[in-house]
Amino acid sequence: MKQVWKCDFCSKTDISAEKISQHEPKCSFNKVNKTCYTCKYRFEAGYGGEHIPGCEINEDIYRGEDDGNCPGWVYEYLEKERDEKLNDILYDKN
Ligand SMILES: [Zn+2]
């Protein structure tokens, strides 16, 4: 058994904490990168397990997946995140 470090955004692990801290800012599932993977407009257009990316608002999906910073990006869990922040403000005053 080995102790590993895990990315906060995806399932990537490594025994080196440094490698994971270098990966996290660039991770495709980190919403700061605005990739398809965290966008509400993304859908899977492939059948039978083949991955073909689809975009509900027809942005460039290959750029969206690889480079991120898509102009049409909207966070997939925007409403949930907003509700959680509001709850924190309203009910967590202690
Ligand atoms: Zn990651």
Image: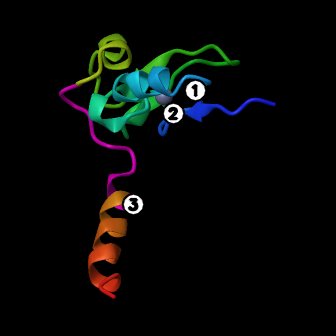
**In the rendered view, would you say 29 is above or below 68?**
below
Which residue is farthest left? 71
Other-residue count near label 3 (Cα within 10 Å), few / some / many at <14 / 14–19 / ≥20: few
Q: Which residue occupies 32% across, 53% down?
A: 78
- Locate residue 16, reporting x and y percent: 55, 22
| Residue type indicated by callout 3 | Lys
Identify which residue, 90 or 54, lies in the foreground: 90
- Locate residue 74, reporting x and y percent: 28, 40
User: Is residue 71 rendered magenta in the image?
Assistant: yes
Q: Which residue is mark 3?
A: 80
- Locate residue 54, reporting x and y percent: 43, 22
Disc 1, disc 2: CB below 8 Å?
yes
**In the rendered view, would you say 74 is above or below 50?**
below
Callout 2: CB less than 8 Å from ligand 1: yes
Q: Is residue 53 visible?
A: yes
Callout 1: CB less than 8 Å from ligand 1: yes
Indicate which disc residue 12 carries.
1
Callout 3: CB less than 8 Å from ligand 1: no
Q: CA distance from mark 1 to mark 2?
A: 6 Å
**In the rendered view, would you say 53 is above or below 38?**
above
Q: Which residue occupies 28% across, 15% down?
A: 60
Q: Which residue is mark 2?
A: 7
| Residue type indicated by callout 1 | Lys
Instruction: Name the side, left or right, on which 35 lies relative to 29.
Output: left
Q: Earlier in the sequence, mark 1 or mark 3?
A: 1
Q: Earlier in the sequence, mark 1 or mark 2?
A: 2
Does dot 2 land on a helix, a strand or a loop? loop
Does dot 1 land on a helix, a strand or a loop? loop
